[in-house]
């Protein structure tokens, strides 16, 4: 259990952060996660305390809380932080992770604007002033301090890594930020639930960036800031944490907007299947027959096609479920494309019935032969027709299952809306 040097004033319950109940009072909570930062923590806190007066004087913020979370430090980090009476110090007996430290600081301190700052001396706390002004005056949900400017002293390897992460996120979200892993941010407390859940490790920041960018309803702004060389040794492993960041970005993208990840895969699978089918089609048109060895190609096409259809149907269901879980199902249906929006149910039933009809047409000679003689003569039904018909029937099964789920989810939404209405909350 964490220990604190100053009893906090509870401003939240459970895992939800609660805003200050006093009208016109705006509290900024700055959390400094620290793991063995005895060389830098004192200087960083002094800069934060100096910036506090300016922030209060030149913005709508009326109070600034400073929180240091010693994340299992084995040096004098916590001791030094406790030497500043205006600072809340939380100590973890064991290392829980960068993200866990930030979340615990927010949970205990609360606040209207939730911020964090690396304790290593790389970022200037004075930049919280323009960040707070943007968040409050422009109703921005998340304000990022961008370290990618010309005056940044970020190491080249990390700068390149940030550019790669930004490119991946930009491709997936169709929105862009330049610094996906910035260690200096301001978040409106009311917007935090839309970003949850967030990981406990160093991938906390890219995960937050991914979730924010994939949610089109969240407003994000970047503010260029200076970035200095850190004091002490970095905890970041470029290769290991780079892979973790990439995985977290993709995971967050799938969680918020599944289609942005899966639809390109569906497209690639479909293109490969079409490319593989060109030779059999050409051969049949020229010669009127298909050689036996092409059965392996047909089975490969069948497999690729079924994977594509399965992934597409799963994507449609996932998008509906995600919108339902995020309490934005009505807005989702209003904006969704017809092939997975309000008219999607009819589309899938029609496509499924067309698939079955085509399958029956393809194998009809075999059906007639079996009805007349009790067996299927090879001359009446070529194996290629059976393979294609099998694909169409299996595709029908996938689309029928999707259509059934798309009838269940709206019923769940109606039930959800009724429960929320009974409890006094809107959906």
Image (cartoon, rainbow, N blue to C red):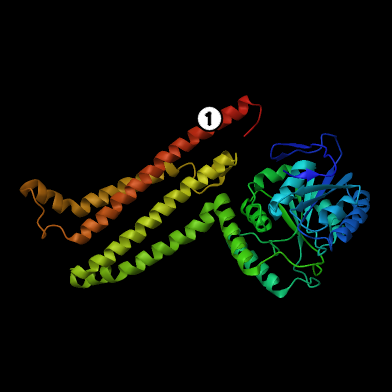
List the single residue furthest toward the left.
373
Q: Which of 146 and 218 is in front in this view?
A: 146
Q: Which residue is drawn at 61% across and 30% down?
A: 420
Instruction: Residue 283: name its quadrant.
Output: bottom left
Vertical placement of 199 versus 331: above or below?
below
Percent across and percent down for residue 327 are 60, 39
Vertical placement of 41 versus 8: above or below?
below
Q: Nearer the viewer, residue 320 or 87?
A: 87
List the single residue furthest toward the bottom.
156
Left or right, residue 27 beside residue 389 = right
Q: Residue at x 79, y 50 (%)?
A: 135
Regarding residue 61, the answer to whether it shows in the image is no
Q: Which residue is drawn at 24% across and 68% down?
A: 294
Q: Which of 133 and 282 is in front in this view?
A: 133
Regarding residue 90, the answer to whether it shows in the image is yes
Label 1 crowding class (10 Å Cα cut-off): few <14, some 14-19, many 20+?
few
Screen quadrant of the N terminus: top right
Q: Which residue is drawn at 21% across and 56% down?
A: 386
Q: Nearer the viewer, residue 45 or 275?
A: 45
Vertical placement of 32 versus 159: above or below?
above
Left or right, residue 343 beside residue 277 = right
Percent across and percent down for residue 423 are 64, 26
Instruction: Residue 156: name its quadrant.
Output: bottom right
Mark 1 sits on what residue? 415
Percent across and percent down for residue 56 are 91, 48
Percent across and percent down for residue 173 are 60, 58
């Amino acid at each position: 259990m964490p220990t604190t040097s100053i009893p906090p004033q509870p401003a939240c319950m459970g895992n939800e952060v609660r805003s200050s109940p006093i009208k016109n009072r705006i509290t900024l909570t700055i959390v400094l996660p620290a793991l063995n930062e005895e060389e830098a923590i004192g200087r960083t806190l002094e800069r934060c305390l100096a910036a506090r007066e300016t922030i209060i004087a030149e913005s709508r913020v009326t109070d600034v809380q400073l929180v240091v979370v010693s994340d299992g430090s084995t040096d004098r980090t916590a001791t030094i932080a406790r030497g500043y009476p205006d600072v809340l110090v939380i100590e973890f007996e064991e290392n829980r992770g960068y993200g866990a430290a930030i979340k615990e600081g927010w949970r205990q301190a609360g606040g209207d604007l939730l911020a964090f700052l690396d304790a290593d001396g790389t970022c200037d706390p004075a930049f919280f002033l323009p960040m707070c002004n943007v968040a409050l005056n422009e109703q921005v949900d998340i304000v990022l301090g961008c370290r990618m400017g010309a005056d940044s002293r970020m190491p080249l390897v990390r700068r390149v890594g940030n550019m790669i992460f930004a490119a991946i996120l930009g491709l997936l979200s169709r929105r862009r930020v330049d610094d996906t892993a910035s260690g200096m941010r301001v978040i409106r407390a009311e917007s935090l639930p839309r970003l949850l859940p967030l990981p406990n490790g160093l991938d906390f920041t890219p995960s937050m960036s991914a979730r924010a960018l994939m949610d089109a309803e969240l407003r994000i702004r970047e503010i260029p800031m200076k970035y200095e060389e850190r004091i002490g040794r970095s905890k970041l492993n470029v290769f290991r944490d780079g892979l973790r960041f990439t995985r977290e970005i993709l995971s967050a993208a799938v969680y918020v907007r599944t289609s942005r990840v899966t639809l390109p895969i569906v497209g690639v699978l479909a293109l490969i299947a079409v490319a593989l089918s060109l030779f059999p089609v050409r051969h049949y048109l020229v010669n009127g027959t298909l050689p036996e060895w092409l059965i392996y190609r047909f089975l490969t096409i069948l497999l690729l096609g079924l994977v594509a259809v399965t992934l597409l149907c799963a994507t449609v269901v996932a998008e509906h479920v995600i919108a339902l879980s995020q309490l934005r199902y009505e807005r989702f249906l209003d904006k969704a494309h017809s092939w997975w929006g309000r008219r999607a149910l009819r589309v899938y039933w029609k496509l499924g019935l067309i698939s079955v009809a085509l399958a029956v047409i393809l194998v009809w000679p075999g059906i007639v032969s079996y009805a007349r003689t009790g067996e299927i003569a090879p001359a009446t039904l070529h194996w290629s027709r059976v393979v294609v018909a099998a694909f169409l029937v299996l595709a029908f099964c996938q689309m029928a299952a999707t259509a059934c789920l798309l009838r269940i989810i709206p019923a769940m939404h109606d039930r959800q809306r009724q429960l929320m209405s009974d409890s006094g909350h809107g959906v």
